[in-house]
Amino acid sequence: MESVKLICIVCPQGCHLEGVKEGDSLTIKGGCKRGKEYAYKEITAPCRLVTTTIPVRGGVVARLPVRTSAPFPKKKIRELMMFLKSLEVQAPIERGAIVVNDILGERGIHLLAARTVALDGKSSGKS
C-alpha cells in the first residue's frame, strides 16, 4: 500500500487529499468531486502548463514568450525544454499564433506565441 498526500488547488479552499494505491486500485480520500478528479490526475498522469521564451529573428524584441496550449505531461518537460532551446522564430508573429503543432507528438498540445512581435524597422529595410 502506498499513500500520497496532496493539497487541492482546484478552488481556494485548499482541502487535504490522500491517494491510497493498493495494487492497480487508487482510492482518493477527502475533498469534493472536483478535488478527487484533480488528485486522481495528479497521481496517475501529472501535467503542467509550460511557459518560457525563445529567440526571435528580426523582431523589435529579442525573445518571444511562449506557452503550451494545454497542460503538458510532467515526465516530458525536460525533453520539451531541450527542444525549445534549439527553436527560433522569425518576426513578425502574432499573439496566439501556433509556433509548433502537436509538440513532441502530444496531440492537441501546441506551442503558442504569448505576445505579438513586430518586425524591427532596421532589419526589414525601412528607415
Image (spheres, grey):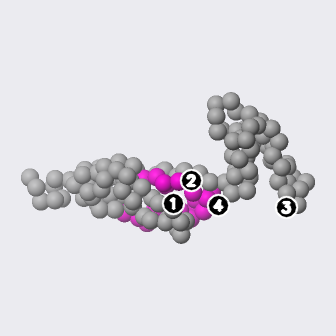
Residue under numbered circle 4: 75
x, y (%) of residue 2?
87, 52
Residue under numbered circle 2: 71
Residue under numbered circle 1: 109
Residue under numbered circle 3: 24
> In the rendered structure, which disc, 1 or 3, sits on the residue that comes first in sequence?
3
Placement of the N terminus among the 4 image quadrants: bottom right
Q: Amino acid at mark 3?
A: Asp
- Please tell me whether residue 68 is drawn above or below residue 105 in the rendered image: above
Please provide the residue range marked out in magenta: 66-88
Is 101 magenta? The answer is no
- Please tell me whether residue 23 is drawn above or below residue 117 in the rendered image: below
Q: Toward the viewer: 25 or 99?
A: 25
The reply to whether callout 1 and callout 4 are in contact (CB within 8 Å) is no
The reply, left or right, for residue 60 in relation to residue 47 is left
x, y (%) of residue 68?
49, 55
CA gap, disc 3 to disc 4? Answer: 20 Å
Q: Nearer the viewer, mark 2 or mark 4?
A: 2
Q: Amino acid at mark 1?
A: Ile
Any part of residue 83 in sight: no
The reply to whether callout 2 and callout 3 are in contact (CB within 8 Å) is no
> In the rendered structure, which disc, 2 or 3, sits on the residue that comes first in sequence?
3
The reply, left or right, for residue 109 in relation to residue 73 is left
